[in-house]
Amino acid sequence: MGEPRPVMDQWLKGPHSVAFKRLLEPASRKLAASLEINSPEKSPKCLVCHATGFLREDRPEVTEGVGCEACHDPGQRYANFKTMARLGGLRLRKPKESAVFAKKVGLKYPTGEDCMRCHGPQIEVDQVTYLNPHNQPFDLKAAMVTIRHWR
Ligand code: HEC
Ligand code: HEC
Ligand code: HEC
């Protein structure tokens, strides 16, 4: 305990933790209505980028927004406090060892390509293509700095 909390706190302060709540706002209703979607918070057409694991039957993490697993893969093994503390510590002292340990516990390091799945013009999940209804420019390099949560 102790050390891993900042990872969580920084993610909470970042843009991805509010992604699901966003779908409950009037702006989302308006955009959804224009696309003939009734409930953006229930529609795969919005959840695909604004939530985690929306295709799982019980949808356990949808309300988390874009959570850890959306970028780092399902984390039963990496996502516990002890492992996080070790990763965070190793990262600073021994980056090479940290990468080996991360792999062992199933923490994938997301690349720019992974970001572009949601920040690009369309995303494909289970052979279904969903269009991005926004038309925002995205500066990947700057965005990587914005979401920094690992130190
Ligand atoms: C392909 C991924 C993707 C899909 C699908 C998607 N969004 Fe988004 N959404 C984003 C991203 C990325 C942002 C942040 C910046 C931007 O606007 O591109 C965002 C931002 C928003 C915002 C904040 C205001 C704004 O426009 O920047 C609202 C509101 C929103 N989305 C609602 C929705 C609703 C409602 C749906 C379903 C009809 C939806 N989104 C579908 C990726 C997506
Ligand atoms: C939007 C994508 C995204 C989300 C969401 C996200 N991360 Fe990350 N995370 C990254 C990126 C990118 C890196 C840096 C990878 C690199 O350095 O190559 C990173 C790095 C890390 C590291 C550092 C690993 C090391 O070697 O020290 C930890 C630990 C971590 N994230 C944990 C989390 C946790 C816990 C959550 C949820 C609370 C989370 N991340 C959510 C993208 C994300
Ligand atoms: C699962 C989809 C998803 C992935 C993967 C993802 N994002 Fe996002 N991102 C979103 C959504 C949705 C928002 C809008 C959140 C809101 O305001 O409602 C967003 C917002 C952002 C924002 C703030 C708005 C903006 O456009 O500047 C930044 C910065 C950002 N993401 C960076 C990243 C980076 C860097 C990565 C890769 C390491 C990444 N994202 C991966 C879905 C995603």
Image (spheres, helix red, strand yellow):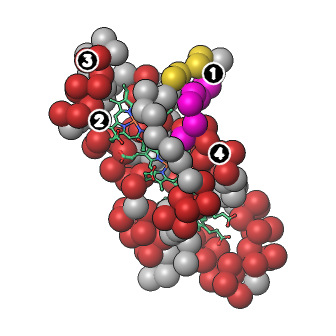
Q: Are marks 4 and 3 in contact (CB under 8 Å)?
A: no
Tell me the kind of residue under disc 2: Leu
Give x and y (percent) for residue 67.
Answer: 47, 50
* Upstream in sequence: badge 1 or badge 3: 3
Distance from Cα at disc 2 to Cα at disc 3: 12 Å
Q: Which residue is mark 2?
A: 23
- Which residue is most to the top? 36
Label 1 amino acid?
Asp
| Above or below, comparing residue 21 to residue 89 in the picture | above
Q: Is residue 46 left or right of residue 124?
A: left
The CB of the residue at mark 2 lies under 8 Å from ligand 1: yes
Nearer the observer, 143 or 7: 143
> Mark 3 is on which residue type?
Ala
Q: Secondary structure at mark 4?
A: helix
The tag earlier along the polypeptide, 4 or 3, is 3
Task: Pick whichever of labels 2 and 3 is earlier in the sequence.
Answer: 2
Quadrant of the frame with the C terminus: bottom right
Look at the image and give the residue range highlighted in magenta.
119-125
Residue position for label 1: 126
